[in-house]
Image (tube, rainbow, N blue to C red):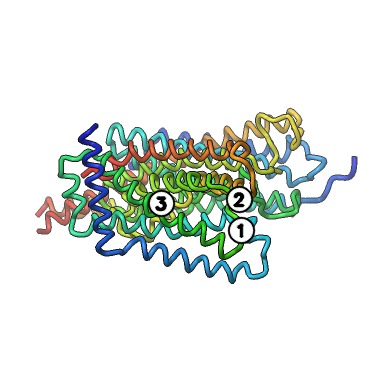
Amino acid sequence: MSEIPDTTAYLIAGYTLFVLGTAAYIIYLTVKWKKIVRLKSEQADLLKRRQQH
Amino acid sequence: MQSLFPKKYLLLDIIATILILCAAAMVFLYAPTETNMGLVQKVFYFHVAYAWVGMLSFVVACAFSIVYLSKKDLRCDLASEAAVEIGLVFTLLAVGSGSIWARPIWNTWWTWDPRLTTTTIMALVYIGSMFLRKSIDDPNKRGRILSIYCIIGCASVPLTFFSIRGYRSIHPVVIGGASSGMNMTPEMLQTLIFSVIAFTAFYLALLAHRYTYAKVREDVEITKLELEDMDE
Amino acid sequence: MKLFLHDLIALIKKDLSIEKHTREIFLVMLIFALSILFILNFALDTEVKARSSGAAGLIWVILVISGQLSLNQIMNLEKQGNMLEALLAAPISRTAIYFSKAITCFLGMYGMALVIFPLYSIFYNTPLNSAHILWISALGCWGYAALGVLISAMTIQTRMRDILLPILFFPVIIPLIVAAVKSTGAIFQGETIGTAMPWISQLIAFNVIFTAIGMISFEYIVEE
């Protein structure tokens, strides 16, 4: 049994990639989601106002 | 915001988060350190999970495409759109993490191994289909053409793997091969299986979110057209 | 069946006569291929070994890249002046339209292969070895045309058109190209048909698969 090679730096790099990549995608989705919900509520307001007229 | 997003999906989010946290705990606390590779071997658990989800997503997209073609239900096309986008993210992360793992172990960032090559070609097919989606406006035409492309991709990618399989490979054979590569202890195997399950749950949660987004977006498009009609 | 063949031949004749008058596609394609052949000369200036050992790969790269021009053009031909709608409205089966396009495209590709293979052999002094190259390259060209026409029928309906074709087409045609390169390469190295057979049978299998996909899905793509 030789000693275990020290590859901690690569471990950290790998998991940083996982966390950052996944987080980036979730943030991207959240931003898109917020935008579309805002658009939807704007449309709902617009529709309501149209019907009142 | 809550009103648009079904409550039952929220449960999936919570389950997926808990499972992933457990998987991470298993990777760092439960699984033993591999003696030949050192700590970097721990990347492998999530790497396999990401690659698995990437491939699963490809099959899911293809399945939705087939259903779309037979039923002409636009919702299937939206689901396939969701699967393609999420699949691309997971595939790229799997290739990237594999590269980081390969650097200390194989002494190279990249090798033309069948699995690596095929996975990357799969990512290219994903990207191609996203471009294709962006450049067609009519939803019915888009659904039809996209579905066919997904099916072609799903048929062609395994053929690619099959045709370059004969090349010399240094990628460890994890499943269905007792020869070289990794000698996994039971703890390692359990951790691997658990992370694959955790990420599958995470994938389903993401798919639900992305699909709901696509549906709301289509609604907004339709309402927009109606509003324009009213203006005239 | 007789009607099908009749339609098929009529459609191919139509495309070929357009080509005869305009000489748009084939010549452009050939000149393009020739210029790549010459660029390769500079790229491989000192690598004499690479020229012969990589011959099969290089020739197929030339064919794949220049064949893409014909794929774009062959469907654009119908898109101009809404010819495609007229064709679809005519009482012709979609399968006949698909095969006529694939065959025309195949003729172009194969014609080009027949020029490029000997030219490469002359320019770079690599022997072609065997006449089997003739039908092996035909197999490669057919698979390329069968899938290419399908993808081309998709991309002409998009906003990005020509630019989209290569990025959609190249990733999915890879297995066929691998098999084609391997089997022609084996013949170039002087192997017999027997030892190259695994690759050739793969090539045949991919041809069958791609033709089946094309035949079945073409009607979904051109549906109005």
Task: Name the one closer to the observer, C192 or B110.
Answer: C192
| Residue holding disc 1 | C126
Mark 2 crowdedness (10 Å alpha carbons): few <14, some 14-19, many ≥20: many
Cα–Cα span, label 2 and label 1: 8 Å
Same chain letter for marks 3 and 2: no
Is residue B2 visible in the rendered image? The answer is no
Disc number lying in front (1 or 3): 1
Q: Is residue C200 left or right of residue B30?
A: left
Residue projecting furthest to the right: A1
Residue B149 on image: x %, y %: 39, 44
Q: Which quadrant of the figure contains the C terminus of chain B? A: bottom left
Q: Please name the residue shown 68% across and 42% down the image.
A: B44
Amino acid type of the residue that numbered disc 1 sits on in the rendered structure: Thr
Pointer 1 and pointer 3: residues touching (CB < 8 Å)?
Answer: no
Q: Is residue C216 shown to the viewer in this render?
A: yes
Residue for point 73% across, 43% down:
B41
* Residue receiving disc 2: C188
Secondary structure at badge 3 equals helix
For the residues marked 3 and 2, what is the alpha-carbon distance in whole angstroms? 39 Å
Going from N to C along the chain, the mark reached first, 2 or 1, is 1
Q: Badge 3 local density, few (<14 within 10 Å), some, or many (20+)?
A: some
